[in-house]
Amino acid sequence: MTGDARFEDGDEQPLRLIAYEAEDLQVISALVQDAVFPVTEMAWKPKSGRFAVLLNRFRWEDVSGGERRGSYERVQSLLVIDGVQKVATQGFDRGDRDLVLSLMSLGWAEGDTPSGRLELVLAGDGGIALDVEALEVTLKDVTRPYVAPSGHVPDHPD
């Protein structure tokens, strides 16, 4: 079969996406919007240059115009960033082991090509900045979807 992939071709399979360019990162950013994770579920391995977060991701790919047949779902996903040289956080206490963070978006600021800064923008003015050798971000679903505890689509009041 030749031709471009269609969204429908994905069916109910787990996501596995990789971003090497800013345009690719926009897709991953949209899919991780409103993901939540305990502060204890993020890790940086300086020797390997890998930063990872285990997210509880809202399944935006199942929502069309804010509506879905059946229950809204979340899925646990790994967000992995390779080539990380430095990690900085602001706006939250990394030592608060009970803290749950909400991811709003991913942003990219290019430096001296191919390096740059990947920013994980959190709700409540928090953030995580990763200085990277090059843009390499992977999003991979690692569990089956489960019913979203809230039972509704995340809301962003003005």
Image (tube, rainbow, N blue to C red):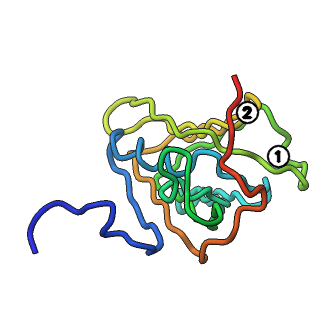
| Image quadrant where one finds the N terminus | bottom left
Q: What's under tag 1, amino acid-wise?
A: Arg
> Measuring 31% from the left and 34% from the top, which residue is drawn there?
113
Q: Are marks 2 and 1 in contact (CB under 8 Å)?
A: no
Front-lying residue, 38 or 83:
38
Q: Label 2's element?
A: loop
Q: Is residue 46 above or below residue 104?
A: below
Query: Which mark sits nearer the N-terminus, 2 or 1?
Result: 1
**Residue reaching furthest left?**
2
Residue 36: percent from left, percent from top: 71, 52
> Measuring 39% from the left and 31% from the top, which residue is drawn there?
110
Question: Relative to 126, is 93 on the left or the right?
Answer: right
Q: Is residue 96 above or below residue 71?
A: above
Q: Is residue 82 above or below residue 8?
A: above
Query: For residue 148, which quarter of the picture?
Result: bottom right
Residue 30: percent from left, percent from top: 49, 45
Number of other residues with Cα within 10 Å of mark 1, as a class: few under 14, some 14 to 19, many 20 or more: few
| Image quadrant where one finds the C terminus | top right
Q: What's under tag 2, amino acid-wise?
A: Gly
Front-lying residue, 110 or 53:
53
**Residue reaching furthest top?**
158
Q: Label 1's element?
A: loop
Front-lying residue, 153 or 17:
153
Disc number for residue 94: 1
> Measuring 41% from the left and 52% from the top, which residue is drawn there?
136
Disc number for residue 126: 2
Distance from label 2 to label 1 (Cα)? Answer: 11 Å
Residue 134: percent from left, percent from top: 38, 45
